[in-house]
Amino acid sequence: MAQAAQAIIGDSEFDKDTAVTLREEGVYDAELSAGWTIIHAVNGGYLLAMLGRALGEALPHPDPFSVSAHYLTASVPGPAVIRTQVVRTGRTLSTGQASLFQYAEDGTEVERIRVLGTYGDLDSLTDDIRTSVKPPDMAPIEQCFGPGDGPAPIPGSSAITERLDIKLDPSTVGWAIGAPSGKGEMRGWFGLADGRDADPYSLLLTVDALPPTSFELGLKGWTPTIELTTHIRCRPAPGPLRVSITTRNLAGGFLEEDADVWDSADRLVAQSRQLARAPRS
């Protein structure tokens, strides 16, 4: 994947834009960057990564294992405050919750997203792997398509695409030329545009960074996340990630998206499921 300048973990645009500043015990100040918006809202994966980082600072264990988020109202660029609470600490795992608030015009706080997460140490996991899942069958990177290879499918901000290096498998880009497959699938290669390698926090972004599967179902428009649960399975190896997302059921105006993320060593590093509202177009 093209990388103009290799950023490093801890010193990249993603790290700076998800940083939180301790105000007092359990309370962190943050600034939601306009660089991670899509259509008219801040991306849900970016928000999850920021809250995940705040919980990582509040809990005694370093790595997110399972993080569940409920998106209450759409977040907008600007200042925010994150309030955390330690629920339980143990020898190998600790659990906490966090809520992100922004401010209404009258100065009152509005809760945007609430998260419950369990943390541990990924480096302490055993090497015992028993799985029936396999990496997705995808075209090589050079045969896949990025945002510059086709017209913008929807109006509004696409700032987040400038910060991501996404190449979509040709079998899942029919929507971009007005010929969606109807299969509810999205697959692609993923990385950050500045070349920063993946880590557990960026995986929280990765699971919600590809175009929604609703596009391949023939729908266009905002697909807001209602709830998103992510499992981080191991620390990713350097190099591009492969992401496969599927939707099996759209009913009653809602759909689910199941995502698998694989690293360059062919390991399943993250899984997620989200419930989203289908576009109304």
Image: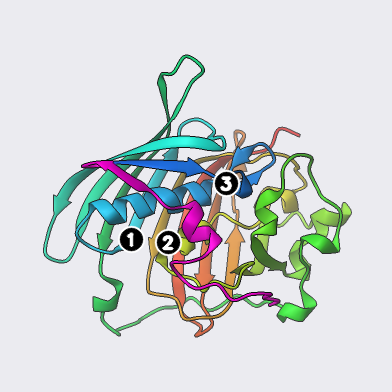
Report which residue position mark 3 lands on.
43
Horizontal and vertical percent for residue 79?
A: 47, 35
Range of residues picked out in magenta: 1-26
Asked whether 171 or 101 is in front, the reply is: 101
Amino acid type, label 3: Asn
Quadrant that contains the C terminus: top right
- Is label 3 in contact with label 1 (beta carbons under 8 Å)? no
Report which residue position mark 2 lands on.
201
Q: Residues within 10 Å of mark 1 (few under 14, many from 20)?
A: many
Amino acid type, label 2: Tyr
Horizontal and vertical percent for residue 125?
A: 26, 77
Asked whether 281 or 153 is in front, the reply is: 153
Quadrant that contains the N terminus: bottom right
Q: Earlier in the sequence, mark 2 or mark 3?
A: 3
In the picture provided, is 50 more to the left or to the right than 177?
A: left
Disc 2 element:
helix
Q: Residues within 10 Å of mark 2 (few under 14, many from 20)?
A: many
Horizontal and vertical percent for residue 98?
A: 32, 42
- Is label 2 in contact with label 1 (beta carbons under 8 Å)? yes
Give the residue displayed 19% in from the left and 59% down from the top.
60
